[in-house]
Amino acid sequence: MRTLISTAFISLDGVVEAPGGEPGYRNTGWTFKHTEFLPEAFEIKGREQSEAAAMLMGRTSYEAFSPVWPDMAEFAEYKVIPKYVVSTTLTEDDLVPNWGETTILRSLDEVAALKRTEGGPIIVHGSASLNRSLSDAGLIDRYHLLVFPLLLGAGKRLFSTTDKDVQKLNLVEHRAYPNGLQLNVFDVVR
């Protein structure tokens, strides 16, 4: 069984929308506009690239990342690993040709089947809606949360508001940085 890891830049009040400057959100670019950059706080991002054996994302994140990430040196290791996009609307013609092997999955059942294959961890970047669905379906095994000391109010949230039983998490790694960022790594307790 492969490990499915959700990784997110998240505000203290749970917002994950437009951290890098994506258009259409009032507080877009909040990760670099309001918090001093400390390279050591982002060490987890390099570790994720070296440890991930595949990447999973939703259609919206794929459409945001695929025109940019393939040519960025910061994401070079992601270029060579398989990518999976969960979408009911994308077609093969919508996939970019310069980002390596990409497979479209049509359902959470297909994500569950992917998890049952052999291989290393699968990392989920962005994809707020997909994250909520994966969490509600019990498919996420670990969270890598880089928590920013900001309250953003409205915006897409990482966690759903579905009425469900308590889901216990086990804190397996934590760091606090002088700029107020916190790294919290949680394993989902089954």
Image (cartoon, rainbow, N blue to C red):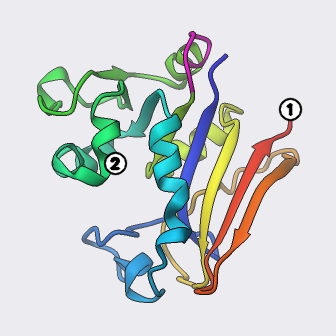
CA gap, disc 2 and disc 1: 28 Å
Which quadrant of the figure contains the C terminus?
Answer: top right
Residue at position x 53%, y 35% in the image: 51
Residue range of the region highlighted in magenta in the rendering: 115-120
Q: Earlier in the sequence, mark 2 or mark 1?
A: 2
Residue at position x 62%, y 69% in the image: 14
Question: Please, what is the three-letter code of the amino acid marked with disc 2?
Answer: Ser
Examine the structure image and report whether residue 152 is included in the region drawn in magenta: no
Which quadrant of the figure contains the N terminus?
Answer: top right
The numbered dot on residue 77 is none
Residue marked by disc 1: 190
Question: Please, what is the three-letter code of the amino acid marked with disc 1?
Answer: Arg
Residue 138: percent from left, percent from top: 71, 33
Residue at the front extreme of this rendering: 40
Residue 26: percent from left, percent from top: 35, 82
Image position of 159 with respect to 5: above or below: below
Q: Is residue 60 visible?
A: no
Q: Quadrant of residue 13?
A: bottom right
Residue marked by disc 2: 61
Q: Judge the density around disc 1: few (<14), some (14-19), many (≥20) Cα neighbours within 10 Å.
A: few
Tell whether 62 sits left or right of 114.
Answer: left
